[in-house]
Image (cartoon, helix red, strand yellow):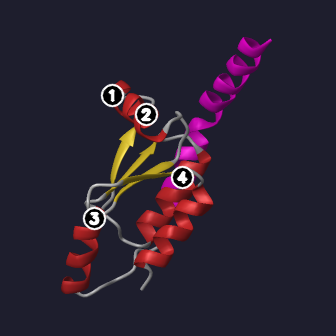
Amino acid sequence: MNVVIRFFFRALRRLLMPFMLAYAALSKPKPVTRSKEEQAKVDAACRQLTLYQFASCPFCIKVKKQIHGLALPISMKNTQKDAGAREELERGGGRVKVPCLKIVHDGGREEWMYESDDINRYLKERFAV
């Protein structure tokens, strides 16, 4: 039964994927504008962030819209197409679930944030203009 349910949702996601990707492309917010100095600071801070995601995930789209709106150059890893990224996510975060934001704090401590609302709240609090 579990296999049937998994197959159903995988087929549904493939069917809806073109619509979700079109929605993501057409509904991007206008990015904020910062001075060059402020943007340079944001760029440096974003080097400590990595978003684990995949293109047709609606929650990932929600987070990527926030990233675009805040003009954040966060590196992204696609866990569907990159087995290494999937393995990193499972090894570091403890589970394979997207979206997941990996935050490397000063001193090297890693934090793995999973929920899209939590990720968006964190990004807004840290980088909002």
Residue 27 can be seen in this image: no
Residue drawn at point x = 43 percent, y = 76 percent? 126
Give me the C-alpha separation between circle 4 and circle 2: 14 Å
Disc nearest the viewer among 2 and 1:
1
Task: Write down the residue under mark 2.
Answer: 79
Q: Out of 55 and 43, give the one closest to the viewer.
A: 43
Q: Residue 39 placed where, x, y %?
A: 25, 78
Q: Earlier in the sequence, mark 3 or mark 2?
A: 2
> Which disc is residue 84 wearing?
1
What amino acid is at disc 2? Thr
- 27 in magenta: yes
Residue 35 can be seen in this image: yes
Give me the C-alpha separation between circle 3 and circle 2: 26 Å
Query: What span is colored magenta in the figure?
Result: 1-29
Task: Write down the residue under mark 4.
Answer: 61
88, above or below 112, in the image:
above
What amino acid is at disc 1? Gly
Q: Where, quadrant-wise, is the N terminus in this rendering?
A: top right
Disc 3 vs disc 1: Cβ atoms closer than 8 Å?
A: no
Q: Earlier in the sequence, mark 4 or mark 3?
A: 4
Disc 3 vs disc 2: Cβ atoms closer than 8 Å?
A: no
Disc 4 vs disc 3: Cβ atoms closer than 8 Å?
A: no
> Around disc 4, counting alpha carbons within 10 Å, would you say few (fewer than 14), some (14 to 19), or many (20 or more)?
many
Give me the C-alpha separation between circle 2 and circle 1: 8 Å
43, above or below 75, in the image:
below
What amino acid is at disc 4? Ile
Residue drawn at point x = 47 percent, y = 57 percent? 64
Give me the C-alpha separation between circle 1 and circle 4: 22 Å
Check disc 4 and report its element: helix, strand or loop: helix
Q: Is residue 88 left or right of residue 66?
A: left
Magenta span main SS = helix
46, above or below 18, in the image:
below
